Image: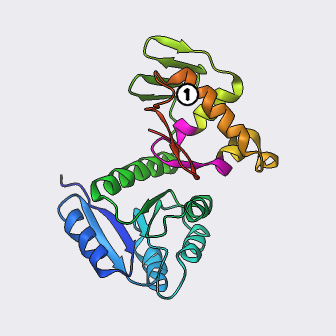
Amino acid sequence: MAQTPTTILAIEDEAPIRRFLRAYFKGRGFVLLEATTGGEGLSMAASHNPAVILLDLGLPDIDGFTVLSSLRQWTQTPIIILSARGQESDKVTGLDAGADDYLVKPFGVAELEARIRVALRHAVKIGSGEEETVFASGDLRVDFAARKVLVGDREAHLTPIEFKLLAVMARHAGKVVTQAQLLREVWGRSATEQGHYVRVYVHQLRHKIEREPARPVHLKTETGVGYRLE
């Protein structure tokens, strides 16, 4: 039986970008819908129920952040921002407002497809209520139920806070998690101004889960934004 293509909605006013996406995704198991304004994008998101939304910030009628806010009022569809705005503040604003990922133009479509597939996997888990019991990547293994972390055949002994931080990152693996989100999920809403907590504990974690902490392969920094567990 043929697999149903995955529908992607691109809310993007730049014709070259749309052609670029159209050419790449054709024949790769995706159907690309195109909207050139924020208003059209909101309408198409409601009527077509896409699996993933690609959102430009510099739209001609409505600012992309406003579109993002409007979408998040009624849908949890994965949203990946594609924007020429590369400032850290824009990335943080977009991710904290509910975007699943953020790519700066120009970007590689192979990387975009990888980010889309990560977002889709998360969406399936959320929609099904599925809860992973074990996360594994390379030599890193996190057993949520047993609260045990293995690096190769060696157990990494984490403090409760270190384990909670790693568990949050593992449950969002492949996605950027902002510093503010980590503070909320690990330390609570009262700690949202304590950014140094995250830096200190990430530093400690790297010394326990990375073979070379100065050159991490698992826990990567997204400068000025947050962290990504590969």
Q: Residue at x 51, y 26 (%)?
A: 213
Q: Magenta includes 197?
A: no
Magenta part of the protein: which range? 169-181
Side of 3 where 116 appears, left or right: right
Colouring style: rainbow
Of 225 and 148, the residue lying toward us: 225
Tag 1 secondary structure:
helix
Can you tell which quarter of the image residue 147 is in?
A: top right
Of 37 and 93, the residue lying toward us: 93
Q: Is residue 6 above or below residue 187?
A: below
Q: Is residue 158 above or below residue 100?
A: above
Image label count: 1
**Residue 169 image point, x, y percent:** 56, 38
Q: Residue at x 55, y 27 (%)?
A: 206
Q: Is residue 10 above or below residue 4?
A: below
Side of 121 where 21 appears, left or right: left
Side of 70 where 220 appears, left or right: left
Outermost residue toward the front in this view: 214
Q: Residue at x 59, y 32 (%)?
A: 166
Q: Is residue 155 above or below residue 9?
A: above
Q: Magenta includes 176?
A: yes
| Pointer 1 local density, CA inside 10 Å: few below 14, some 14–19, many at least 20 | some
**Residue 190 image point, x, y percent:** 82, 48
| Three-letter amino acid code at the position of disc 1 | Arg
Q: Quadrant of the C terminus?
A: top left
**Residue 9 image point, x, y percent:** 37, 71
Q: Residue at x 60, y 38 (%)?
A: 168
Instruction: Say which residue label 1 marks.
Output: 206
Side of 25 where 127 appears, left or right: right
Can you tell which quarter of the image residue 145 is in?
A: top right
